[in-house]
Image: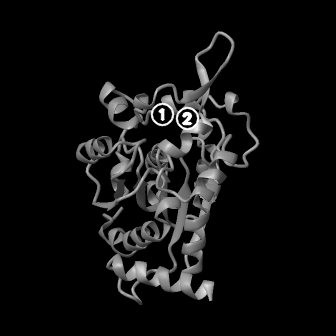
Amino acid sequence: MLVKQEAEKTMSVREESGVPRGTIPLNQHFVLVHGINGGSWCWYKIRSLLENSGFKVSCIDLKSAGIDPSDVDSVLSFDDYNQPLMDFFSALPENEQVILVGHSAGGLSLTLASHKFAKKILLAVYVAATMLKYGFCTDEDLKHGVPDISEFGDVNQLRVGQDKPPTSILMKKELQREIIYHLCPHEDSTLAAMLLRPGPIQALKSARFIEDGEDEVEKVPRVYIRTRQDKVMKPEQQEAMIKRWPPLNVYELDTDHSPFFSTPFLLVGLLVKAAAFDVQTRPPF
């Protein structure tokens, strides 16, 4: 009975999202990328809903995240941090394309992949994510793309190498629900408190994508899913990035920074809608 109810909910989300039955491209392959401190486990609800609907789904653990065994304090460059995602694309068959989805700082990983593997990406979907064409190159990039949670006081635990700046960061457990998961079920914020790992702050700060020659990143269609009650990536920051580098489409969820927990059915509905419609506008190579 529960499985039937869940299936009915999923179908209702499809209809509410404006995706007619029978037109959803079930051959699409979704690749899901977590944000800092997270891991592929963040997507467990989204993966289940998409796979139950017939889609192929891959979830990536970036280096030192999730179940990746790497020591976070040894990950000092953005390229190193994203090596698992780069390896995934390198191994992808030449004729296969994916819909790449990134949350929060995972948006930087999407942009890096779009610079390097544009032909293998049908669509990039930024979910409450940092969306900067060239990464952190200017003060304006930092203002728009780095979360400002200073209003909550001293929220982070920093790990500092000897005679070096902080190499990793993790929000204090007692503040995680209030800031990141305030609209999520308690069981999900409890799970997150058990599984979040320190993130490689120096690697993220070094995220810069300067290309020579043709601008491959512009060949990848983008959509943005903004979160209106976000305490991490503030709505005004999201809006500023959207205006600076306009995507094809902007969708909206009235939720917190973690819609994969707080509004999974609605998020899946938007992902399916994007898969059905936004990939059709891709320019030819």
Cα distance, mark 1 to mark 2? 5 Å
Report x, y in % for residue 164.
Answer: 62, 14
What is the quadrant of residue 170 in the picture? top right
Report x, y in % for residue 27.
Answer: 52, 78
Q: How is the image coloured?
A: one colour
Kindly tell me whether residue 240 is visible in this rendering.
yes
Task: Name the residue carrying label 2.
Answer: 78
* Camera-nearest residue between 52 and 283: 52
| Residue sitting at x 33%, y 30% | 143
Number of other residues with Cα within 10 Å of mark 2, as a class: few under 14, some 14 to 19, many 20 or more? many
Looking at the image, tell me whether mark 1 or mark 2 is earlier in sequence order. 2
Identify the amino acid type marked 1.
Ala
Query: Do tag 1 and tag 2 residues touch (Cβ < 8 Å)?
Result: yes
Report x, y in % for residue 270.
Answer: 39, 68
Question: 27 above or below 227?
Answer: below
Task: Name the residue carrying label 1.
Answer: 207
Label 1 element class:
loop
Identify the amino acid type marked 2.
Phe
Number of other residues with Cα within 10 Å of mark 1, as a class: few under 14, some 14 to 19, many 20 or more? many
Q: Which mark is residue 115?
A: none
- For the N terminus, which image quadrant? bottom right
| Residue sitting at x 48%, y 42% | 179
Question: 206 above or below 250?
Answer: above
What is the quadrant of residue 43 in the picture? bottom right
* Camera-nearest residue between 174 and 202: 174
